[in-house]
Amino acid sequence: MNYKSPSIVIAEDEALTLKMLTYRLQKEGFEVRSASDGKQALALLSESTPDLVLTDLLMPHHTGIEVLTYVKEQLGNDIPVIILSGLGQEASVAEAMRLGAAGYLEKPVNPNDLIRIIRKIVQEVLS
C-alpha cells in the first residue's frame, strides 16, 4: 500500500508564525505549502486541492473568511479549514464557524495543540 502524507495549505501573514508552523508540520510528516497572504493562498488552492487548510483571519489581499468561502464553494465541504485568530476577533471566528470552519485556534498558537487538532481532523476526513 502506498501511503501519501496529508497535504496542508497554510495562509499566515506573520512571517515568523508561518515559518514555525511550516517547520513543525513538515517535521510531523505533513506535506506543507505556505502562503504569506490571502492572494497567494487562493493561488495555491487553485493549483491543487489539499487535505486541510490552515488560515489566519486577517491577512492582506484576502481574509481568512474569503479563503474559507473559496474552499467551501470551489473545492467542496469535505476540505476542513482551521482558522487562526487573535484576541478580539470573536465575531469573525463565529462567522467562520457558521460558514463551515472545522475549528479555530487563538494566536499565539501552541504547536502541540495544533498538531493534535490537525491529526484528529485529518483522521476523521481520511478514514
Image (cartoon, rainbow, N blue to C red):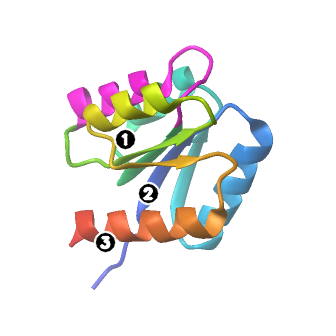
Q: Is residue 17 left or right of residue 95?
A: right
Judge whether 125 appears above or below 49 on screen: below
Question: Which of the two labelled residues, at mark 3 and mark 1, occupies the earlier sequence position?
Answer: 1
Image position, residue 55 (x, y; %): 51, 38
Judge whether 18 appears above or below 126 on screen: above
Would you call the spot at circle 1 few (<14 residues within 10 Å), some (14-19), or many (20 or more)?
few
Assess whether residue 91 is covered by the magenta stretch.
no
Q: Of circles 3 and 1, which is in front?
A: 3
Q: Which residue is mark 1?
A: 48
Image position, residue 28 (x, y; %): 58, 73
Element marked by disc 2: strand
Q: Of circles 3 and 2, which is in front?
A: 3
Element marked by disc 3: helix
User: Can you tell which mark lies on residue 123?
Assistant: 3
Q: Which residue is mark 2?
A: 7
Instruction: Please state which of residues 95 and 32 is positioned toward the viewer in this rendering.
Output: 95
